[in-house]
């Protein structure tokens, strides 16, 4: 692993730790020693479809992995993996989620915010989907979206630091 990527991982981890301190909906469950791999728990509502029935769940496991060429090349399917099965949203297909513009070197905090907005139905694109069935379902249930209006970092218990 080169020095530039190692510095990116350290800076990314530092920024991500600040982000995690400002939220009560994302928890870090595990990370590797080189700060390249994270397992996250999103304590938020989302949708699943099991045996043909769409229902709301609470809590989603997500894995983030930053490959060594991440500063030059970024693809959602390489960086983000859903670990909770049967998530049923337009931008989700099996373990893949499309958060829109994932650019090389994008910090974990920004990736996490984008994931949260997709999982909670705050953001979706019915014109560009991974899951056509979910798109049709959401289109006919727009009154249920978003599943929550709660921001990932905007909470009553967030306190401002004195400077």
Image (tube, rainbow, N blue to C red):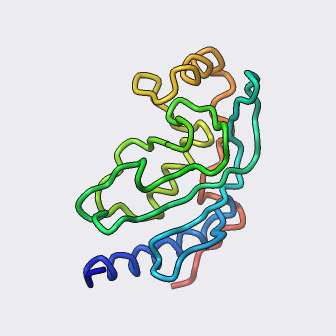
Position in image of residue 47 (x %, y %): 69, 35
Q: In which quarter of the image is the N terminus?
A: bottom left
Which residue is found at the position 55% from the left and 59% from the top?
A: 63
Residue 135 is left or right of residue 129, and the answer is right
Which residue is found at the position 40% from the left and 65% from the top?
A: 66
Which picture quadrant has residue 87?
Answer: top right
Position in image of residue 22 (x %, y %): 60, 68
Position in image of residue 102 (x %, y %): 35, 50
Residue 118 is left or right of residue 147, and the answer is left
Which picture quadrant has residue 5?
Answer: bottom left
Q: In the depicted view, which residue is nearer to us: 18 or 3?
A: 3
Which residue is found at the position 61% from the left and 57% from the top?
A: 154
Q: In the depicted view, which residue is nearer to us: 1 or 40?
A: 1
Which residue is found at the position 32% from the left and 69% from the top?
A: 68
Residue 163 is left or right of residue 46, and the answer is left
Position in image of residue 37 (x %, y %): 50, 69
Position above or below: 70 against 52: below
Residue 129 is left or right of residue 117, and the answer is left
Q: How many marks?
A: 0
């Amino acid at each position: 692993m080169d020095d530039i990527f190692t510095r990116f991982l350290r800076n990314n981890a530092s920024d991500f730790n600040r982000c995690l301190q400002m939220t009560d909906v994302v928890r870090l469950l595990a990370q590797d020693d080189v700060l390249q791999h994270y397992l996250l728990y999103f304590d938020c509502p989302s949708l699943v479809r099991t045996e043909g029935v769409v229902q709301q769940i609470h809590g989603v496991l997500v894995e983030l992995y930053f490959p060594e060429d991440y500063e030059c090349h970024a693809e959602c399917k390489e960086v983000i993996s859903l670990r909770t099965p049967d998530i049923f949203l337009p931008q989700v297909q099996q373990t893949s989620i499309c958060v829109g513009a994932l650019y090389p070197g994008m910090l974990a905090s920004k990736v996490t915010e984008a994931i949260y907005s997709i999982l909670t139905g705050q953001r979706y694109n019915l014109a560009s989907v991974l899951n056509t069935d979910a798109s049709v379902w959401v289109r006919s249930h727009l009154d249920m979206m978003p599943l929550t209006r709660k921001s990932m970092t905007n909470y009553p218990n967030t306190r401002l630091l004195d400077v």
